[in-house]
Image (spheres, rainbow, N blue to C red):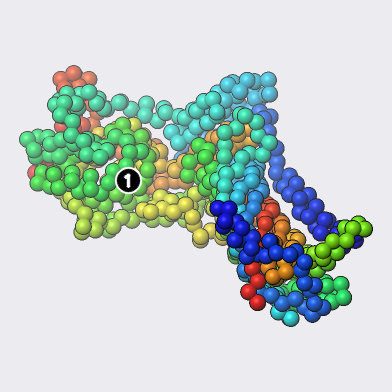
Amino acid sequence: MKKLIQPIIFIAAMFSLVSCASSILEEPSTDKKEVFEYAWKTIDERYSFFELKNIDWDAVYSRFEPGISNSMTDEQFFDSLAVMVDVLKDGHTGVTSPFNSHFYIGFFTRGLENYDHRLIVDNYYHSWGNRKGSFYHTALAENQVGYIAYSDFSNSFTDEDLDYLLTKYKDTKGIIIDIRNNFGGSIDNVFKLTKRFAKEKTLLYRSRTKTGPGHNEFSEPVETWIEPADSSKVSYYGKVCLLTNRKVYSAATMLTLSMRELPNVTVVGDTTGGGLGLPIGVELPNGWQIHFAGNQILGVDGSPSYEMGVPPDIQVDMKKEDMENGVDTIIETAIKAITSN
Amino acid sequence: MKKRLLTLLTIIGFSSSLLASSPSDSIPKYVYLAFGGGLNRTSVNETLNTSLSYTGFTPGFSVEYSMATSKMYVELRNVFSIGSLSPYKAGSNFNNTMQNIYENINLNALWLLYKKPESKFYTYAGPMVSGKVQVRGKNSNISNSAYTYDISASFGLAAKVDKYVKIDHIFSWPINEQNFKLGASISYPLVSNVWLQPYSGITKNIAQEGGMLLDLSNSYFGYFLNYTNIEVNLAVAYLLKNKNAIELSYMHDYNSTQPKHNPSKTLNQMLSLKLYFNFK
């Protein structure tokens, strides 16, 4: 009997040890004060643009904390968090819950819309919709200029798509790439596009990430270079105009920051919306999530200010009377820049 | 399928007489190749991108090579599990999930330190090296910081005790003689290198062409004050007449990283059934 007990004790020990997991597990909290504290502190320690935007985050705590209590409904609490993160005025900032998602979209209200899709369809495409992958395209100015519109970096494209377009417009005086109203998406597209217009290895930008809770604790900047596309792919070294407006955000702003470093590229239109801090996030104790910018993309000059938008080489605002006459002054300026000697 | 199962049972001698030969008084010598499968309860308490604890049962598998001579015991073991975890004690308000991959490779070379042949009790101890990987991804809207990992490569000490038990009656009822081996082992790293996601959960090269989610340049030197990894294994093996064995085993692998920021704790508790094939 004694011998039988030994295996039984061993097996019982195995099963009882399985219950030990609770020693490292913590129950979630729905206490709204606790959730608020966690959200505020996480942003305080990890958000990457407090200094650039001159935000007093302690004052934000003082403003919002007294209003937080467990008597609030989830909707009210959600709204409080949403208003709090909106103080950052950052399109990469938001709150997500099972019943609602909030993110800041006010970044594009800093300037005019500077884009009218209907106007382009009526007066430049002439209702002629050429589409290759995610690109719409047409020839302009009596085939002297190729026009390629790319309005969503979330839609990918293939190397074959670019090969086709750059071959089609290879004999033009220049190409217009219209990324107005492009809110961004995958940054892989930045490199896939930029290298087709780069004749030599080029420094595009620098980046640095938070390394600690201090508002200015960052890693040493890392340089990002681009190599020209390999010879099996079609490249274009003629004049290129990149059209931008305030709704060019995130990865699309990153494309603008990158393309402007190429000597054959001119940025035309309005300052972009910015959004150069890659978004990161955390899960709050009640299961909701907040996201915000967690690093900085710096210009070649080392400045983080492009977070607020990359300025164009040629600033153009679309005037109401021009639009009423079916003229997109940003496209027209680009055509002029390409066709003039 | 049924045929295959029968063949397997025949191979391991399960269908033959369960009367096993008594282990001799000399030290047991064997070369085993073992395959196991079971359930791994993984529990995670990390701080980089969540304030929630996650837990769940995922399928786990193991492959093991072990060899015992009159002087030492050598074991090379690989454990792998993959699956989805849920927030601990979360209500219906939560739709968060975590995908988890666990990999544990362990090499122990242990010397026989103490033996008591009359009671079939053997104690081994010696060095161990281990490599452990745990990669986690969340479905939440937390963007580029959804992935975390802790990877460790360690050198440390391990110890193991084996006790052979012969059972020939239950209470006062005589039964055919059955032989079991009870085993317990523990390992603890003395020095480790621990790789983790950087402070914000994104790598420094994420904004570069082909930017990676994994940055192995971010690591720290681990020792007993800042890295704990206790692995305990318990096993009851039923020794078959043909020298193969069936084992019920339990692995308890507690891992705690304490870097400057974002400490994490994980616990893998795997209950598995292993089939041991003797090659000696």
Side (left or right) of A230 relative to B99: left
Residue A218: x %, y % from top left: 51, 51
Q: Is residue B226 visible?
A: no
Image quadrant of residue B31?
A: bottom right
Residue at image mark 1: A189
Question: Image point 61% across, 61% down: which residue?
Answer: B8
Is residue A330 positioned above or below B138 on the image?
A: above
Identify which residue, B164 or A230, lies in the foreground.
B164
Question: Image point 76% across, 54% down: which residue?
Answer: A14
Residue A20: x %, y % from top left: 75, 48
Disc 1: host chain: A
Image quadrant of residue A81?
A: top right
Image quadrant holding the C terminus of chain B, namely: bottom right
Q: Can residue B218 be seen in this view?
A: yes
Callout 1 secondary element: helix
Q: Which residue lies furthest to the left in this view?
A: A142
The number of numbered badges drawn on the structure is 1
Residue density around tag 1, few if under 14, some if 14–19, many if 20 or more, within 10 Å: many
Question: Image point 51% across, 61% down: which residue?
Answer: B217
Residue A297: x %, y % from top left: 41, 47
Q: Which amino acid does label 1 sit on?
A: Asn
Is residue B25 positioned above or below B175 on the image?
A: below
